[in-house]
């Protein structure tokens, strides 16, 4: 493996985090734009097609959660192995992790293809909307394997401290999707007019392009893929290590789409157009949290390499700076979305009910984005500390103890606005809890390494 030296254990922490975050932000915004491009063009087909795309959002998030959970699990281990200077383990974790992720996703493809109708009926889709959902998902599922390579591979590359290359790979997918979406949806040039099916085909093509780019970088540039023949026991050992961290991460990540699915069910009581508005607002939320998510994505390699090198002061200082930034940025994002909610909503659809639902969401939920960022940073830190069940527990607490009950209660009391108020309160309480829990376990890790500090 080239450039094997740990890059993140020296230098000023603040400028380093900024330097790592900026290229990651470009890629993150690109992936958010990936979803917004689909939403924009499908919205031109009509509110029913837009609602169909909104119904698919929880399922898409589940698949992404599986791949991302395994990718983050691998990244946490790879970054620590780099900090320790164990290059053989870096290669084994990368190679074996990619194989594991691919095999798992293939199983989910098979399950998904046979459960489209019952699943989306359960989520509240009407017969008219279900027709378009089938058109989209019957194609989208075949592209699932192409989610794995860039998701896991980019996290492995990021573990080295390189955030520019993963961002470039993500941009490849965005550009491809932006080019193909209008051509296949509306039948521009030599392409047939395929409607919502065209959006699904465009997504598969874009994901395939990103997969090929990620594979090339892993094999040729960083040589993190090993083609050496090894024993099955070594592969299983790598799988066990990745799954120990990756399964709780994937489980925690899957809680989000499950909760979004439940929220979709709550909002469906107010009509198809309200669901369409909620779907658009959810995608805008990903855009609003892009900077914080980018910081969270690069925070794992920073924490991992410094933990591997036993540099606890840098870990604590990095946490302090990242949390402060999250709070400031989150509040700034709230102000922008609050004052520009209507023109933003009008970009995606002109229907009054769709627009009003988007405005309600953007005027309420973003107030808690800063503390949601603290939760994301805390989860990243706990995973690298090999406390994945604690990280998953935080997300589970947020969703099942706070998010869902408060959304139901808010909906009962104040209808759609009340549901969104419940979401904001859940984000805020969970963020405060994450701060104190993460701080405790970082201090405990330092005491375990320096027992005399307990005295």
Image (tube, rainbow, N blue to C red):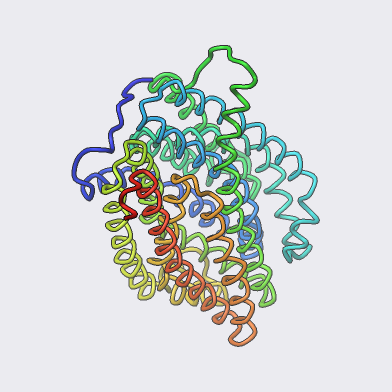
Question: Residue 171, located in which quarter of the rendered image?
Answer: top left
Q: Quadrant of residue 441?
A: bottom left
Left or right: residue 36 versus residue 328 is: right
Give coordinates of residue 143: x percent, y percent.
63, 37
* Residue closest to the eye, 314 or 203: 314
Q: Residue furthest top?
A: 229
Q: Residue shown at 54%/32% (left/top)?
A: 149
Up the image or down, 6 lies above or below 413; here it is above
In the figure, is residue 182 to the left or right of 446?
right
- Residue 185 visible in the snapshot: no
Q: Is residue 354 above or below residue 143?
A: below
Q: Nearer the viewer, residue 294 or 440?
A: 440
Q: Please state the horizontal and vertical placement of residue 352, each as a whole percent of the image.
A: 54, 77
- Residue drawn at x 38%, y 21% is 221
Q: Is residue 21 above or below residue 329?
A: above
Image quadrant containing the N terminus: top left
Name the residue: 40% across, 70% down: 343
Instruction: Classify residue 341 as left or right of residue 49.
Output: left
The quadrant of the picture occupied by the C terminus is bottom left
Pick the front one: 62 or 161: 161
> Could you say where residue 189 lies in the image, as x and y percent from the top left?
54, 38
Residue 406: image quadrant is bottom right
């Amino acid at each position: 493996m080239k450039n094997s030296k740990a890059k993140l254990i020296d230098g000023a922490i603040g400028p380093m985090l900024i330097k790592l975050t900026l290229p990651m932000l470009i890629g993150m915004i690109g992936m958010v734009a990936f979803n917004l491009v689909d939403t924009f063009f499908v919205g031109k087909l009509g509110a029913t097609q837009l609602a169909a795309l909104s119904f698919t959002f929880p399922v898409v998030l589940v698949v992404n959660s599986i791949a991302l959970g395994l990718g983050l699990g691998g990244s946490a281990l790879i970054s620590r192995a780099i900090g320790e200077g164990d290059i053989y383990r870096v290669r084994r974790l990368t190679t074996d992790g990619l194989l594991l992720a691919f095999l798992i996703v293939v199983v989910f493809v098979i399950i998904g293809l046979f459960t489209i109708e019952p699943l989306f009926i359960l989520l509240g889709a009407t017969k008219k909307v279900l027709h378009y959902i089938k058109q989209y998902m019957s194609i989208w599922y075949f592209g699932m394997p192409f989610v794995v390579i860039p998701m896991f591979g980019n996290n492995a590359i990021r573990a080295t401290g390189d955030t520019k290359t993963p961002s470039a790979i993500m941009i490849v997918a965005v550009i491809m999707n932006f080019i193909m979406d209008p051509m296949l949806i509306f039948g521009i040039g030599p392409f047939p007019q395929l409607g919502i099916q065209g959006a699904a085909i465009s997504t598969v093509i874009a994901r395939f392009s990103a997969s090929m780019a990620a594979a090339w970088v892993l094999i040729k540039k960083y040589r993190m893929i090993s083609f050496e023949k090894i024993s099955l026991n070594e592969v299983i050992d790598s799988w066990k290590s990745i799954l120990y961290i990756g399964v709780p991460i994937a489980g925690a990540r899957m809680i989000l789409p499950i909760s979004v699915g439940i929220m979709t069910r709550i909002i469906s009581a107010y009509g198809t157009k309200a669901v369409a508005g909620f779907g658009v607002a959810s995608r805008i939320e990903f855009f609003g949290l892009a900077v914080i998510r980018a910081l969270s994505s690069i925070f794992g390699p920073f924490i991992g390499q410094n933990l591997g090198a036993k540099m606890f002061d840098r870990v604590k200082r990095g946490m302090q700076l990242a949390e402060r930034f999250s709070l400031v940025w989150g509040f700034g994002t709230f102000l922008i979305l609050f004052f520009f909610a209507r023109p933003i909503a009008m970009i995606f659809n002109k229907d009054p009910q769709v627009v009003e639902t988007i405005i309600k969401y953007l005027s309420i939920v973003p107030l808690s984005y800063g503390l949601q960022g603290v939760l994301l940073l805390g989860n990243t830190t706990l995973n690298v500390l090999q406390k994945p069940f604690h990280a998953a527990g935080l997300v589970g607490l947020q969703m099942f103890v706070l998010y869902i009950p408060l959304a139901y209660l808010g909906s009962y009391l104040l209808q759609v606005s009340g549901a969104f108020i419940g979401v904001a309160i859940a984000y805020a309480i969970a963020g405060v809890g994450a701060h104190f829990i993460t701080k405790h376990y970082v201090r405990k890790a330092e005491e375990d390494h320096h027992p005399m500090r307990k005295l």
